[in-house]
Image (cartoon, rainbow, N blue to C red):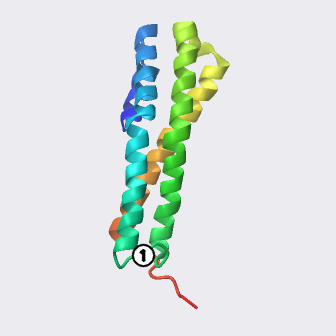
Amino acid sequence: MTFLLLSINAGAANDASQLQMCYAAMNFLAKTSVRVSTIGAAVSGVLLSLLTHWGMFKYYWIIAKQILTLLSIYLGIIGMYNWALKAFEVTSAEGLDALHNAVYMVNHQQLWVGIVLQIISVVSMFILSVFKPWGKRKTS
């Protein structure tokens, strides 16, 4: 959600320093709290699966959550970091003129797609945890 708010703020920026600070904050968060929280969520999910009756592969909804977790790890650790860093570099070099730069625009769109996918992924994991659809896998 923080990336979403910072991206909205960057889109409404009136000066170069505001634009740069939005991307600097995103880059800092991507290097620190996003990495730690993503890895922490993955580790806690694995421990909950292994140490409870749910198991790692007994239920379809758990497998779906694992896939979404891998997507979140990729987007959070690799995607958000790279997109925020690229945006910071371009805006640092060009200021508000970066808003008309094709490289910046493509990068900004990729960042938005990453943010939307992250939000969809987290909401989907929550829904899967609450409703637990698809039931137990059949073992042969």
Q: Secondary structure at mark 1?
A: loop
- Kindly identify the residue that appears in the image at 42 percent across and 75 percent down: 55
Quadrant, the N terminus: top left
Q: Position of residue 2 (x, y in %)?
A: 36, 34
Quadrant, the C terminus: bottom right
Report the label total.
1
- Kindly identify the residue that appears in the image at 38 percent across and 51 percent down: 40
Q: Is residue 79 visible?
A: yes
Q: As displayed, is residue 71 above or below residue 129?
A: above
- Kindly identify the residue that appears in the image at 40 percent across and 24 percent down: 25
Q: Quadrant of residue 45?
A: bottom left
Q: As displayed, is residue 138 above or below residue 124?
A: below
Q: Quadrant of residue 48?
A: bottom left
Residue type (three-letter) at the residue carrying disc 1: Gly
The answer to whether 102 appears left or right of 77 in the picture is right
Q: Quadrant of residue 103?
A: top right
Q: Dot 1: within a 10 Å radius of its alpha carbon, few (fewer than 14), some, or many (20 or more) residues?
A: some
Q: As displayed, is residue 80 above or below residue 21?
A: below
Q: Is 5 or 51 nearer to us in this picture? A: 51
Q: Position of residue 83 (x, y in %)?
A: 55, 30
The answer to whether 40 appears left or right of 137 in the picture is left
Q: Is 48 or 70 nearer to us in this picture? A: 48
- Kindly identify the residue that appears in the image at 50 percent across and 66 percent down: 64
For this orientation, the residue located farthest to the right is 102
Q: Is residue 15 visible?
A: no
Q: Position of residue 100 (x, y in %)?
A: 61, 14
The answer to whether 18 appears left or right of 64 in the picture is left
Q: Position of residue 99 (x, y in %)?
A: 56, 15
Residue pointed to by mark 1: 55
